[in-house]
Image: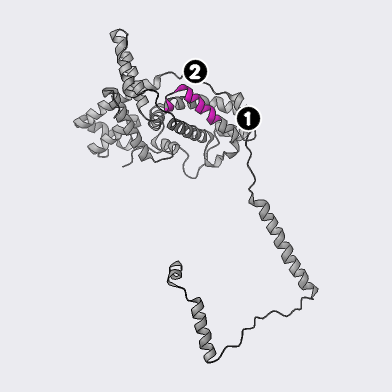
Amino acid sequence: MTTLSTETALDILASHGADPARWPAEHRAALLALAGRDAAVAAALGEARAVDAALADWLARPLPALAVDVAAIAALPQARPQPARWRPALLAASVTLVVAVGGWLGVESWFGGTAAPVVASAPPPPAGAELAEADAAFAYVFTPTAAEEELI
Amino acid sequence: MRMDAPAPGPAPGTTLPPSLATALMLRVADGDAAAFTALVRQLERPALALAWRTLNDATEAQDACQQAFTRLWTQAHRFDPARGNAEAWFRRILINLCLDRRRAIRPVQPIDEAFDLADASPDPESQAIAADQQDRLELAMAGLNARQRAALMMFHGEGRSMAEIAAELDTTAKAVEGLLGRARIMLRTLMTEGTPK
């Protein structure tokens, strides 16, 4: 049997009521034992019984004559799942991409597929003063301001 | 401190066969009106009882149930058996409708005036005492909020665990313990003192 503090016992009685069957199983025996020797727990158990009795009266009241109108509901149309709106757009984009790539490959084949690969030709490196001037211009253009630094 | 036994349910890694309500619900999603009628007959009484005790008003309870079953029919395609059984899904719809509905209702009679009326019973003494007790109980329950009444109904009336109630009220088991504790204290106060705190 686990030990149980008075505070924990009072918490259990406050929320679960006086029926030991509804108490947490691991505290059940300890709470019953504590109620036998702790006046505060015994008093709380008595109060919980009174509230349980009131709740039992409340719950015992017969349900009024109520009913659901099934026919009225079944006469309503049922909603159907809507297809996602992006699907047609995605299909159109896919077709466009296939046509574009296919077209490009087709154009290439017209030229025998022997076209020389395009090689990016770098400009000749500037020399001396021209190089320093180009670096300064690059730094001026691409050095971020203080506000831009914060953004970065 | 753990305050509640775990909710009954399948052990991790195991699956249970679908409940009758779930089997019917899958047919309802295909537009089967006969299955819908059978499903309503299965869920109707407990639903009306829960709504009536939560809302504390028979007409409101009937309206809430009608609305909940209407959603069950019209939005049947949204039901996903992988996410839970049909009964639990329906109960969540119903409880949310009840709590939303209750927020929009103003109390018809201030609780203090109601207690004055209860004291003026013309019955003989013994009957008057009993009637007074009943009236006090009724007015005390009216003094609780709908969420408190729903939790009391589920715990004491339906025998549900804290974890099950927490799932239906979309909160934690610990919060349900607090909700029930406050409801019971308030009920006791209203029953003995006759005025809400």
Q: Which tag is nearer the camera, tag 1 or tag 2?
A: 1
Residue in the foreground of this view, choosing between B40 and B189: B189
Which quarter of the picture shows residue A3?
Answer: top left
Is B88 above or below relative to A52? below
- Identify the image quadrant of residue A105: bottom right
Helix, strand, or loop for circle 1?
A: loop
Dots 1, 2 in contact, CB < 8 A:
no
Q: Quadrant of the N terminus of chain B?
A: top left
Q: Name the residue under label 1.
A: A76
Q: Residue B14 carries which label?
A: none
Residue B84 horizontal/vertical position (percent) = 52, 39
Dot 2 surroundings within 10 Å: few (below 14), some, or many (20 or more)? Answer: few
The residue type indicated by label 2 comes to Ala
Asked whether residue B32 is drawn in magenta, I would say: no
Query: Is residue B4 left or right of A140 when viewed as pictured?
Result: left
Note whether residue B7 is visible.
Answer: no
**Mark 1 or mark 2, earlier in chain:** 2
**Rendered image quadrant of residue A25:** top left
Q: In this view, does B172 lie to the left or right of B66?
A: left
Report which residue position mark 2 lands on: A65
Q: Main secondary structure of the magenta part?
A: helix
Residue A12 visible in the current orientation: yes
SS label for mark 2: loop
The magenta stretch spans which residues?
B54-69
